[in-house]
Image (cartoon, helix red, strand yellow):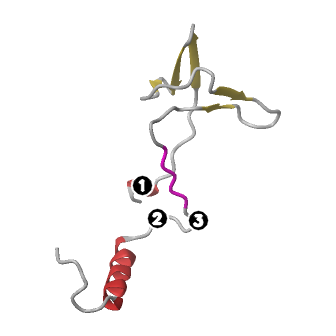
Amino acid sequence: MKAEEAQPSTPSVIRVERSGERLRILVDGEPLPCEVDANGVTTVVSVHHSPGITITIPADRVEVVDSLSGPVDEDRKTRARTHLNSLSPPGSRKRG
């Protein structure tokens, strides 16, 4: 199985440490590699469900890639490029 197709495991312990205005979140003992919004942590506790947290991570830019079909393999990408190039008028293709 390729690394990008591997399902992440469920953490054993998520620990939230607050000290004044600062937050530190550890997942199985490892700190998150980014800052977390101090007002953006919500605990999720419900009967008959696993506990968890919802966090807000500030960023300069957020990109979302959403696909129901899953990752596209390189062979399919190559076939798509070849097909699109065959539709282009002669001489209009980029040379690389």
Residues tagged 1 and 2 counted as in contact (Cβ below 8 A): yes
For image coordinates 42% across by 29% down, the residue present is 33
Q: What residue is shown with label 3?
A: 68
Residue depth check, mark 1 versus mark 2: number of the one nearer the observer:
2
Tell me the SS state at disc 1.
Answer: helix
For image coordinates 33% across by 78% down, the residue present is 78
- Label 1 amino acid? Glu
Mark toward the start of the polypeptide (1 vs 3): 1
Secondary structure predominantly adopted by residues drawn in magenta: loop
**Residue 23 versus residue 3 in the image, above or below:** above
Q: Quadrant of the N terminus?
A: bottom left
Mark toward the start of the polypeptide (1 vs 2): 1
For image coordinates 51% across by 46% down, the residue present is 8
In the image, which disc is placed on residue 4?
Answer: 1
Residue 75 location, quadrant: bottom left
20 with respect to 51 (left or right): left
